[in-house]
Amino acid sequence: MQKVRTALIAGASGLVGGHCLNLLLQSDRYSQVISIGRHDLPLIHPKLEQRVVAFNKLKASSSILVADDVFCCLGTTIKKAGSKEAFYKVDHTYVVELANITAQKGAAQFLVVSAMGADAGSMIFYNKVKGEMERDVQQQGFDAVHIFRPSLLLGDREEKRSGEELASKIMKPLSNLMVGPLKNYKPIEAETVAKAMVYAAAQNQKGVHIHSSDEIATLGSKL
């Protein structure tokens, strides 16, 4: 008989995180889903426990960060964060600290949304931050780490990102033309990324797994 597990999700108010939370609540794999964030979400479910945390003081909440599988959907933009330093805190520091704490608390798997082009050696600040986050998460001692590098995300955001909206309008009609080596650059639905995360967690594969956008689309279609 398979053990019924606890999932912890950070960033459930975001585009991918919202879909991921709904899928986790529907999954028979999890008897409890803990959502951590700066405020409660307008959602009630018998499996859901919401915990308000200060991400800049995450260690103070370490006693409640106990789960089997951790889904990290934290992320922002430099514009929204207000500076490169603030962006780094959200997309690197908070993610790595969450990984560090949950690994110490016995979590087996850490699944995190990164970005296409992530590279710790990149000259592009955004890609460099994402790459450093990936590198540091892998060092935390989980049985398994799954890193998801989606292309341009499609979906309805509560916050408006004019650049991404323009890119979506341009790229979405071209999706069917993106074949062969270009498949990895096709825009991808946020819900598909969430499905890929939940599916990957259920496979119980050990080690580090880095999923390209094309592979994410394949995994998401299996759930």
Image (tube, rainbow, N blue to C red):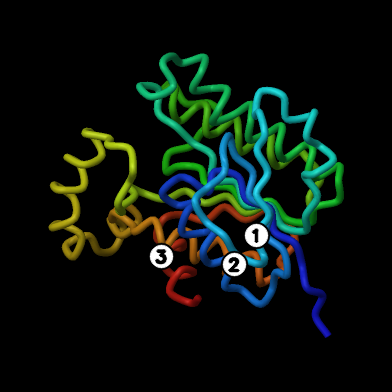
Mark 3 to mark 1 CA distance (whole Å) = 27 Å
Identify the mark at residue 57; answer none if there is no mark: none
Q: Amino acid at mark 1?
A: Leu
User: Residue sitting at 15 percent across and 48 percent down?
Assistant: 169
Distance between the Cα atoms at labels 2 and 3?
A: 21 Å
Q: Quadrant of the N terminus?
A: bottom right
Name the quadrant containing residue 162: top left
For the residues labelled 1 and 2, say whether their Cβ atoms are less than 8 Å apart: yes
Q: Which residue is mark 2?
A: 25
Q: Quadrant of residue 189?
A: bottom left
Q: Which residue is mark 3?
A: 217
Q: Indicate left or right for 47 with 39 as reference.
A: right
| Mark 2–mark 3 CB contact (< 8 Å) | no
Q: Earlier in the sequence, mark 3 or mark 1?
A: 1
**What residue is shown at x 55% (from left), y 33% (from top)?**
131
Q: Which residue is mark 1?
A: 48
Where's residue 181, x and y in %?
31, 57
Three-letter amino acid code at the position of disc 3:
Ala
Q: Earlier in the sequence, mark 1 or mark 2?
A: 2
Which of the marked residues, 2 or 3, is nearer the chain's N terminus? Answer: 2
Measure how far apart labels 1 and 2 are at the Cα level: 7 Å
Q: Nearer the viewer, mark 1 or mark 2?
A: 1
Vertical comparison of 217 with 130: above or below: below
Q: Is residue 62 above or below residue 210?
A: above
Q: Nearer the viewer, residue 44 or 167?
A: 44
